[in-house]
Image: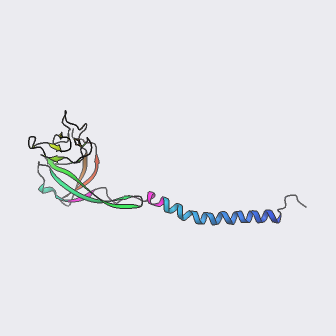
Amino acid sequence: MSNNRVSRRQFLGYTLTGVGGFMAAGMLMPMIRFAVDPVLQAGGTSDFVLTDQRVDDLTAEPVRVDFAFEQVDAWYTSEVTNSAWVFKEGDKIIALSPVCKHLGCTVNWAGDPEEPHQFFCPCHAGRYEKNGQNVAGTPPLGPLDEYETQVQDGFIAIGAPRANTLV
Ligand code: FES
């Protein structure tokens, strides 16, 4: 007779541990999947948001173009509205972020009657050149961000903001 025999008590302990572990895994897996799944989902099909601004209507004068998109933040989806100052420089289309680089107010083109060819931030009188370069001596410490753009069927599509490439 071998000394390695499993007693009834040991067999019952192993069996209950195995079955209990299997049941616990069965309960935990759906919860873990629920918690992690949204984070693992692929993003949208396109990072560009189509606007209703026709390319042919653009001039060298910046115009404000509003756009909206759905933002998925893990489990929460919300509609975000945003805007860009868009104009043409030759054939090139330029879209600048309206977010002031001082404290985040919204800048306006020709918002200061004394400087009609600059962007103006009304919060603390910040000023930017048309290419987004901040004017020295005013509060902003950096140029306005620039959006990537695409033309889709004659309309402007706005992409992600990036550091200004014009200055
Ligand atoms: S937030 Fe624009 S100048 Fe201060």
Q: Quadrant of residue 156?
A: bottom left
Q: Is residue 50 left or right of residue 58?
A: right
The answer to whether residue 116 is magenta is no
Q: Nearer the viewer, residue 72 or 46?
A: 72
**Placement of the C terminus among the 4 image quadrants:** top left
Residue drawn at x 18%, y 45% is 122
Question: Residue most toward the top?
Answer: 137
Question: Residue most toward the right?
Answer: 1
Q: Nearer the viewer, residue 50 or 38?
A: 38
Q: Nearer the viewer, residue 99 or 51?
A: 99
**Placement of the N terminus among the 4 image quadrants:** bottom right
Tell me, yes or no, if residue 91 can be seen here: no
Residue drawn at x 68%, y 66% is 19
The number of discs equals 0
Q: Which residues are magenta?
A: 36-51
Q: Nearer the viewer, residue 45 or 49?
A: 49
Residue 132 place in picture, x, y as percent: 20, 42
Quadrant of ligand 1 in image = top left
Residue 16, above or below 109: below
Residue 32, above or below 88: below
Residue drawn at x 12%, y 56% is 57
Residue 104 place in picture, x, y as percent: 26, 45
Q: Quadrant of residue 81?
A: bottom left
Residue 161 place in picture, x, y as percent: 28, 48
Residue 43 place in picture, x, y as percent: 38, 58
Rendering colour mode:
rainbow
Tell me, yes or no, if residue 153 can be seen here: yes
Q: Is residue 46 left or right of residue 151?
A: right
